[in-house]
Image (cartoon, helix red, strand yellow):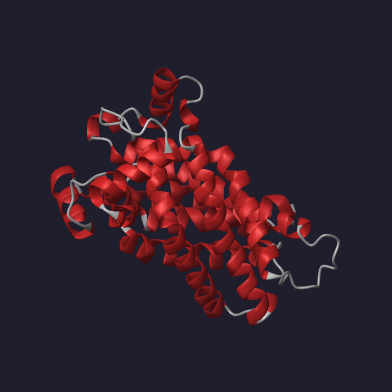
Amino acid sequence: ARHALFLGMRAARLPRSLSRLLTVLVLLTCIVQMTDASIPEPLCRLLAGGIASGAAKSAMAPFERVKLLLQTSTTYSGPIDALRRISAEEGVFALWRGNLANLARIVPTYAMRFALLDNFRTLVRLGAAADVKLSLAQELCAGAMAGAAVCVVTHPLDLARTHLAVSSSSAASVGVGGTLAGLVRQHGWTGPYRGLLVSLMEIAPYTAISLGGFEYLKANLGGPGLDPRTKIAASWISGLCASLLCYPLDSVKRRLMVDGVRGGGKYGGSILRCVTSVIQTEGVRGLYRGCVLNALKAAPTFAITATMNDILKVRLGCGPGR
């Protein structure tokens, strides 16, 4: 079966990042199915979050690249125009450009977010019993801390992924390592952390609402025994709210990340200057360019990731249903 899948991937000429992800998923699935030994809980949580996020993000990768281009450029009139022109000018698989860098960031990011979320939820209990429901404020706080902690670790990969997504074919050929090396040469050792402050300002409320909101809804809709359909609905709602409320900050973060990539940097790393410039030249709606596409992408992506993570944790032996 594995050989058939590999041959099928080659015949379909899937993007390299997708092929690698599918290969990893097949190998992990085989390992889990072939062994009866229990997986250590920390590793179990990391595996569940990583597999769930990798599968969901790869499926939505074309929409992610279009969203980034709409956020950082006025070249395209809208998402349909961007999808059509990229496919025609650069080929269909160009829609997955930067996805390998995104997977290198997303898989460990969500693996660590979901793993750390449980630790931070224990922390915000402040000694309360494990069967006591957390308040909404406590859930939001745990989600924010999980997102901020992971952001500090994975920000360089997010920056590289953004640069690759908005670069031309020739510039993108240097890959993740070449992009990070170029940032170090251009801006010094702090180059890979350009835009970290605005990233933290954006990701903390995003994970507070998405992760914390999801856990709060789960606890109040039925607890650990909640059926998958209700989990999908709960995670869809929390993911959609997080996407819509935090989108302007995400736009500012992306613009600061790519400032100067095409030459003539104009923000100088200033959040205020970026916001002011966008509003003056494009109006307030400039901060929401690509918002609808992002909402259509982010909500189902988070719903799939969060629900699949819960299911995998149970299957691997570290979920509440074990």
The residue sitting at 80% across, 73% down in the picture is: 132
Q: Is residue 231 left or right of residue 264?
A: right
What residue appears at the point 23 percent right and 35 percent down from the top-left corner? 168
* Figure disc tally: 0
- Residue 117 appears in view: yes
In the displayed structure image, the side of residue 3 where residue 232 appears, left or right:
right
Q: Is residue 315 above or below residue 71?
A: below
Residue nearer the viewer, 21 or 59: 59
Q: Nearer the viewer, residue 227 or 130?
A: 130
The residue depicted at 27 percent of the width and 29 percent of the height is 171
Q: Is residue 309 left or right of residue 118?
A: left
* Residue 200 percent location from the top left of the image: 54, 45
Q: Quadrant of the N terminus?
A: bottom left
Please state the horizontal and vertical placement of residue 36, each as a whole percent of the image. 71, 59
Say if 316 sits above or below 43 in the image. Answer: below
Q: Residue at x 56, y 45 (%)?
A: 108
Against 191, is 128 above or below?
below
**Where does the C terminus fall, quadrant-wise?**
bottom right
Q: Quadrant of residue 125?
A: bottom right
Decide if residue 3 is in sight here.
no
Pinpoint residue 51: horizontal percent, then vertical percent: 53, 55
Residue 305, x across and y down, in percent: 51, 62
